[in-house]
Amino acid sequence: MLLAIVLLAALLVRAEARLGETKEQLEERYGKASTEEDTDNNKVMWFNKDPFKITCFLRGNSVYAISYKKKEKWTDDEIMQVLNKNSGQGVEWKKMSAGFNVTQVFYKTTDGQRVAVYSIFQDELMVSFQSEVQKEVDEKQKKIDAI
């Protein structure tokens, strides 16, 4: 049992893309993407790295959001390991209140620069820069205002 936990922890450490990485750094870490899609100045790259399916979202040549999907439920320790690989130097992640939302768990870094959401029923952890989330909200609001 202890050996299984140690092996899983080693896989988790190797299997994380990190916010801010470049396409070249992703390919160095995982090899060639299984699928790649370009739109305007954005790129989406998919990688399979057991136990994860990893989707990286790049603007220009920098990762601004990452989705980690597993086939089974995540433990709190697994979530925190992945989040910690995506935090800045000396920055911690804090679980946020989700109110009545029982299907997702929200996290934010203590410096407010990064956010994450774990979707319980999809076994997926999405990590992003807060500024990118705000850009998306602003763009959607502009579309609503134009109606």
Image (spheres, helix red, strand yellow):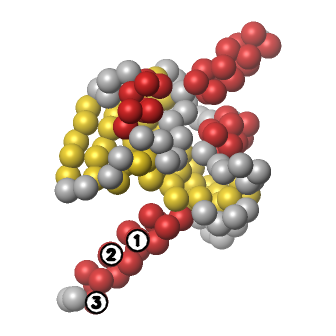
Q: Position of residue 128 (x, y in %)?
A: 51, 55
Discs 2, 3 touching: Cβ within 8 Å: no
Up the image or down, 40 lies above or below 25; here it is: below
Up the image or down, 47 lies above or below 105; here it is: above
| Quarter of the image with the C terminus in it | bottom left
Badge nearest the viewer, 3 or 1: 1
SS for dot 1: helix
Label 2 amino acid?
A: Glu
Please name the residue shown 28% across and 89% down the image.
145
Whether residue 124 appears in this view of the structure is no
- Which residue, given by chain and number where applicable, does mark 1 sit on? 135
> Label 1 to label 2, Cα distance in Å?
6 Å
Q: Is residue 2 left or right of residue 12?
A: right
- Quadrant in the picture for residue 26: top left
Please name the residue shown 53% across and 65% down the image.
130
Please name the residue shown 64% across and 40% down the image.
85
| Quarter of the image with the N terminus in it | top right
- Which residue, given by chain and number where applicable, does mark 3 sit on? 145
SS for dot 2: helix
In depth, the one of 88 and 116 nearer the eye is 88
Discs 3, 1 touching: Cβ within 8 Å: no
Discs 1, 2 touching: Cβ within 8 Å: yes
Q: Is residue 52 left or right of residue 73?
A: left
Number of the label disc, if any, that sits on residue 139: 2
- Quadrant in the picture for residue 96: bottom right
> Label 2 to label 3, Cα distance in Å?
10 Å
Whether residue 112 appears in this view of the structure is yes
Q: Position of residue 31 (x, y in %)?
A: 38, 21
Up the image or down, 5 lies above or below 80; here it is: above
Please tell me which of labels 2 and 3 falls first in the chain.
2
> Label 3 to label 1, Cα distance in Å?
15 Å
* Residue count near mark 1 (Cα–Cα under 10 Å), binned few <14, some 14–19, many ≥20: few
